[in-house]
């Protein structure tokens, strides 16, 4: 069955970087794209970006432009989100999701809490 | 960029009630609209895409409709397990913005 298993919670200081992983299984990795979404405490969902596992093409939302990198590793069927220059307002649960095609996230990881605090 | 709005922000209804949530796009998005359910403390779950296509495994009491700028999610008979926040998302073009959410609970 389709599974997306994300890395564990992180606590980082302002200005640091964090890399969240999303291990995929149960489907052909390179046939899909991966969407990243975050949710600040008590807030709604914010679309962060998308990456193709086929060719590495990326699309990013405006809020993280210049601070975010999305990559995939086809040998380990894992997608990665790296965020640099962390600020307190980056504190959120970060989700990865498989894109079923047509930019529709159909299966989601369990989420990774990233806390930014001095 | 296209903005997404939802109404109401929250609602309270009785078990068995018919519940309707509205999502509006600031520009035409044809039928490129998805609905997600997020139960407390859980990851979002895809319910409906392309405005009205039910994701496999989703109960038939959920339905979606609309085209252009105005869309609705309907729960025909509210159940206790439907307590959640519901989000719409445009999926026609980047950026794939979410609506602010509608919180549904049981009266």
Image: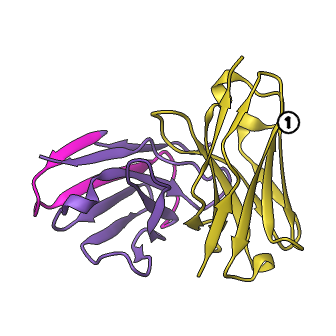
Residue A15 lies in the magenta-colored region: no
Picture coordinates of residue A79 (x, y %)?
A: 78, 61
Q: Position of residue A93 (x, y in %)?
A: 59, 42
Range covered by the magenta-colored residues: B10-31
* Residue at 73 percent of width and 65 percent of height: A23
Q: Is residue A2 left or right of residue B106?
A: right
Crowdedness of circle 1 by 10 Å Cα count: few (<14), some, many (20+)? few
Q: Toward the viewer: B53 or A32?
A: A32
Q: Pinpoint residue B97: horizontal percent, then vertical percent.
A: 57, 48
**Side of A30 relative to B79 (left or right):** right
Say if B97 sits above or below B93 in the image. above
Disc 1 marks which residue? A66
Q: Residue at x 11, y 46 (%)?
A: B107
Magenta region includes residue B24: yes
**Quarter of the image holding residue A64?**
top right
Q: Colour of chain B?
A: purple
The image shows residue A62, relative to residue B16, as above or below, that is above
Residue A91, quarter of the rendered image = top right
In the rendered structure, the answer to whether residue A22 lies left or right of residue B99 reads right
Looking at the image, which residue is at 48% across and 70% down?
Answer: B49
* Residue A13 at x, y percent in the picture: 77, 23
Image quarter of the N terminus of chain A? bottom right
Disc 1 secondary structure class: loop
Q: Chain of mark 1?
A: A
Q: Considering only vertical position in the picture, is A44 above or below A117?
A: below
Of residues A55 and B52, the one nearer the viewer is A55
Q: Residue at x 43, y 52 (%)?
A: B87
Which residue of the protein is positioned furthest toward the top in this rendering? A118
Q: Looking at the rendering, in which quadrant would you find the C terminus of chain A?
A: top right
- Chain letter, colour yellow in render: A
């Amino acid at each position: 069955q389709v599974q997306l298993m994300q890395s564990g919670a992180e606590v980082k200081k302002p200005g640091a970087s964090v890399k969240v992983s999303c291990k995929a299984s149960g489907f052909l990795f390179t046939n899909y794209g991966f969407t990243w979404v975050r949710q600040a405490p008590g807030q709604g969902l914010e679309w962060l970006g998308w990456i193709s596992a086929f060719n590495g093409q990326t699309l990013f939302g405006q809020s993280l432009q210049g601070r975010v990198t999305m990559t995939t590793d086809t040998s380990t069927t894992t997608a990665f989100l790296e965020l640099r220059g962390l600020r307190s307002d980056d504190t959120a649960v970060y989700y990865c999701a498989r894109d079923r095609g047509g930019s529709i996230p159909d299966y989601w990881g369990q989420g990774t809490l990233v806390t930014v605090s001095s | 960029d296209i903005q997404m709005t939802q109404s109401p922000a929250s609602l309270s209804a009785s078990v068995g009630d018919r519940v309707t949530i509205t999502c509006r796009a600031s520009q035409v998005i044809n039928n490129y609209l998805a609905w997600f359910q997020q139960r407390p403390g859980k990851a979002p779950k895809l319910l409906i895409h392309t405005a009205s296509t039910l994701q496999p495994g989703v109960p038939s009491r959920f339905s979606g409709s609309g085209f252009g700028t105005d869309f609705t999610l309907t729960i025909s008979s509210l159940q206790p397990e439907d307590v959640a926040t519901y989000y719409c998302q445009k999926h026609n073009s980047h950026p794939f913005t979410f609506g602010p959410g509608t919180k549904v609970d049981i009266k």
